[in-house]
Image (spheres, rainbow, N blue to C red):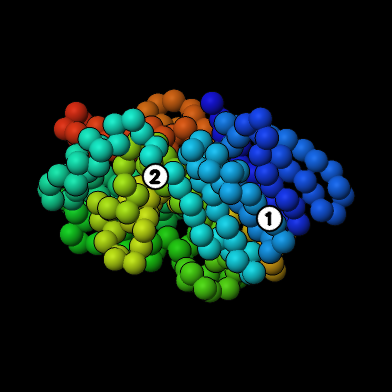
Amino acid sequence: MIKRTLYFGNPAYLKTANEQLVIEMHDSGETKTVPIEDIGILILDHQQITVTQSLIAKLLANNTAFITCDATHHPTGLLLNLDGNSLQSQHFQAQLDASGPLKKQLWQQTVVAKIQNQAALLAIQREEYKLLLNYAQAVKSGDSENHEAKAAAFYWKRIFPDFLQFRRERFGPPPNNLLNYGYAILRGWVARSLVASGLLPTLGIHHRNQYNAYCLADDIMEPYRPYVDKVVCHIIRGNGKFLDMTPSMKKELLGIPALDVMIDGKKSPLMNAVQRTTASLMKCFEGQSRKLLYPEM
């Protein structure tokens, strides 16, 4: 089932009744309802939105990724269910017991998939993409030679039009803001899928920042980032150099979980592909497989 991404950018009162999300809009007085079971991500992007505790509890019980934005309209918080899988304790233990060599192999697969997808996106615009394929082939266990960073340096200099003189910086000028927004949506969905697979989003296979509660989500989302980049490239082509985020841009970015991707030779919505990726990761931790399933752009 394809889950919905709901975005609220105006004053509203959100509550629940009869297993429905009840939306009361302050400006128009209009009331709408949405089945809670249909919601995958809910984003609050206004300082005058009120949410009841009973609604939050039901959203989290449904494993909805609950994202809040700050006064600058950038995602700043993520709430997730603590009990998303019936075998959660068993899965946690398998994750904790995963060996160092296994994690290095999984990270190698992740980096290769990411660079290959970057190359596929760059190939649409430039012949220079072939160097990225060379980097992908050279990735060793654990990416000991840091080909991910080498590929990123090459990729970011070429993926956007030259007039932007783009540098990828979290707090840098546009279109960094669009990338940040899209990655936050992607990160929320990956974290949600990890919980649904009975995994701890905090314990990464590569990322280890002690202040990061979503290290594993940041690992697993890497090969999916180029899909966000592709959406941002499309936005840039339609809007030119001046990239103040507009409602239409947000709408396009909010559609990222529903994008069609190819995974394991079949077309699938990105949200479903992420769930297959996290399920394959769980199989790797349990010793049932040695291969992570990632999409191919």
- Residue 122 sits above or below residue 164 on the image: above
State the residue position of label 2: 82
The residue at 33%/30% (across/down) is 86
Foreground: 154 or 23? 23
Task: Classify mark 1: helix, strand or loop.
Answer: strand
Q: Which of marks 1 and 2 is nearer the N terminus?
A: 1
- Residue 268 sits above or below residue 236 on the image: above
In the picture provided, is 157 more to the left or to the right than 140? right
Task: Classify mark 2: helix, strand or loop.
Answer: loop
Q: Where is residue 22 in the image (x, y as percent from the top left)?
A: 71, 40
State the residue position of label 1: 50
Q: Position of residue 90 (x, y in %)?
A: 22, 35
Q: Where is residue 197 in the image (x, y as percent from the top left)?
A: 35, 35
Q: Tag 1: residue type?
A: Thr
The residue at 18%/50% (across/down) is 104
- Residue 261 sits above or below residue 107 on the image: above
Q: Tag 2: residue type?
A: Leu
Q: Where is residue 17 in the image (x, y as percent from the top left)?
A: 68, 35
Quarter containing the C terminus: top left
Foreground: 61 or 124? 61
In the picture provided, is 154 more to the left or to the right than 108? right
Task: Inspect this view and state whether residue 283 appears.
Answer: yes
In the picture provided, is 182 more to the left or to the right than 136? right
The residue at 31%/47% (across/down) is 200
Is the C-beta separation of discs 1 and 2 under 8 Å? Answer: no
Q: Distance between the residues labelled 1 and 2?
A: 23 Å
Q: Residue 16 carries which label?
A: none
Task: Inspect this view and state whether residue 255 appears.
Answer: no
Foreground: 46 or 179? 46
